[in-house]
Image (cartoon, grey):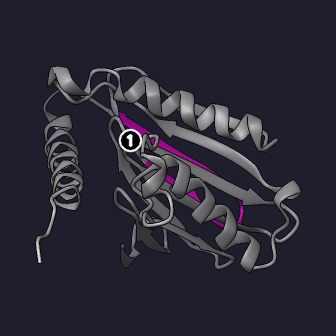
Amino acid sequence: MYTHFDQRFGYTTSTIHPGEYYSTSDDIIIATILGSCIAVAFYDPVKRQGGMNHFMLPGELHSSDYYRESSGRYGMFAMELIINDLIKKGSRRENLVAKVFGGGHVLHNTSSGRIPESNIKFALDFLETEKIPVVSKDVGGYEARKVLFFARTSRVLLKRFKGQLIKPVEREESAYLARIKKKKDDQSKATFF
């Protein structure tokens, strides 16, 4: 996470990356850039606090991995991490509403073709199962997105971009996918003693 003061908006801005989440009751912006990833912004209108996660994959882990994995890179953990963080700060689960963003087709390799749809489906299904209303969404398509979420009010500014502007997002997501795969491969190697 990177935090700085944004002169344009006159707000402190915390930028989250894949696998990260942040929640606060402070009057700040939580920002992220999305390609095939999903960000879910949660807001509690009673406590006037919000948070956002950014995940890369829905979370198709083997059951033996469930208790070892604490990373927000997988949707199933990213959702629980941000919800639990808001609850620790005084929110009640039944007061939360959600806004869902991302799931664009920006990765141009064949092995990632279903990632956007899987991410969108996971996020919407999770929220429906948990009875957290989705009050806004901007998902799918062939564009990347920059999302600015005002944590104290739930206001969102969203900018879509495509063409050459997507290249840095594509590179970052491809590298992140490779790191996830490498970590998964490294964990499966046996250590002899």
**106 and 160: which is toward the camera:** 106
**189 and 77: which is toward the camera:** 189
Residue 36 found in image quarter? top left
Q: Residue at x 13, y 32 (%)?
A: 164
Q: Residue at x 58, y 40 (%)?
A: 100
Q: Residue furthest front?
A: 193
Q: Position of residue 110 (x, y in %)?
A: 17, 20
Q: Is residue 154 visible?
A: no
Q: Is residue 12 above or below residue 185?
A: below
Count of numbered labels shown in the rendering: 1
Q: Is residue 1 left or right of residue 106?
A: right
Instruction: Specify the principal SS of the magenta part.
Output: strand
Q: Is residue 149 above or below residue 22?
A: above
Which residue, given by chain and number where applicable, does mark 1 sit on?
37
Q: Is residue 151 magenta?
A: yes
Residue 86 found in image quarter? bottom right
Q: Is residue 60 left or right of residue 42?
A: left
Q: Position of residue 54 (x, y in %)?
A: 44, 53
Instruction: Give the magenta part as a residue range.
Output: 147-160
Q: Is residue 83 left or right of residue 130?
A: left
